Image: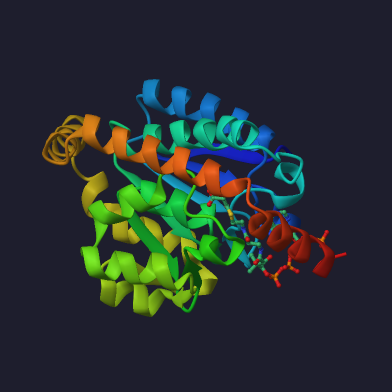
Amino acid sequence: MGKIKYEVYKEVAWVTINRPDKRNAIDYEVMDRLEEILAEIEECQNSKIVVITGSGSQAFCSGGDLSAFHSLVTQKEAYKMLSRMGKILQKIFLFPKPTVALLNGTAVGGGCEIAVSCDFRVAKKRAKFGFIQGKLGITTGWGGAAMLYERISQSEAMRLLMSAKAVTAEKGKELGFINHTVEPENLKEECLDWLQPFLEQPLSVLKAYKSYWLSKCNENKIIERMDEEIYHCSVLWESDEHHQAVRTFLNKNK
Ligand SMILES: CC[C@@H](C(=O)O)C(=O)SCCNC(=O)CCNC(=O)[C@H](O)C(C)(C)COP(=O)(O)OP(=O)(O)OC[C@H]1O[C@@H](n2cnc3c(N)ncnc32)[C@H](O)[C@@H]1OP(=O)(O)O
């Protein structure tokens, strides 16, 4: 089984990051597959909605693979990786079909950025999520802050980003970040129930509403803001503070 599983089930394209032993962290192989699968789903006539989720019950995604990316030392090296994943999240944000992040467990760092790139977030009850990048001496590096400012109020977005703390799905629901919570035992079926009213509409209708949203939020501006954010993160990446924080995490788990 590869690092990403993909299937179409009940008119939904299910994309599952499949590295549960690494808490579904994103490495280059995951990026390769995401690029391929998104292109395939765009053409697919049998799916109306895309759901991105993670394997296992512990994590949706723990962000960038810190052991794989630890070898990236300079701003330039970091920028290449960050902008590549940033492009994938731009693709998800601008995707012509509705997109849903199904948080089957913890979503932190870049995992939260994947979640915010989707139109909707459905979470397992009591799952935690957080833009914890500040603890690593960096900011969101895949454009997550720019997208978060489009999803919830400016002050709540700043609070989540600046505190770098993980909060529960229930708190996320109060903030308008999480749209719906589901029981741990029955994630996929409950998510499908929630999506049922959408699935009853023709794909052309879903696509039209998605395009109205994209024209409202000004695609070019958001891409520009994401690119600036990615560049800024790559500058912070070079700092001793960042490299030391990553070393601490990797040593803790040795
Ligand atoms: C690089 C892009 C940047 C961005 O643009 O946003 C980022 O994503 S920065 C943020 C990176 N992510 C993190 O800092 C999160 C790190 N992980 C954790 O805090 C925790 O693992 C967890 C997600 C809260 C889960 O905790 P727990 O269930 O207790 O699991 P463990 O900590 O024991 O981890 C199990 C296993 O998985 C490995 N792991 C976890 N996260 C990552 C990761 N991001 N990269 C690489 N490996 C990761 C961990 O090392 C353990 O491995 P083994 O020791 O081999 O079992």
Query: What residue do we see at 57% from left, 67% from top?
Result: 135
Residue 161: which quarter of the image? bottom left
Residue 167 occupies which quadrant of the picture? bottom left
x%, y% of residue 141?
A: 49, 46
Q: Residue 154 at x, y = what percent?
A: 22, 63
Q: Residue at x 64, y 56 (%)?
A: 242
**Closer to the camera, 152 or 183?**
152
Q: Residue at x 69, y 63 (%)?
A: 245
- Which residue is at the front of the view, 67 or 42? 67
- Left or right of 250? Residue 236 is left
- As drawn, 182 above or below 214: below
Q: Quadrant of residue 31?
A: top right
Q: In the drawing, does residue 64 fall left or right of residue 21?
A: left
Task: Dividing the image into four quarters, tell me where ligand 1 lies.
Answer: bottom right
Q: Is residue 9 visible?
A: no
Q: Is residue 97 above or below residue 18?
A: above
Residue extending farthest to the front is 240
State the residue lying farthest toward the top.
43
Q: Please provide percent x and percent y for residue 58.
A: 63, 67
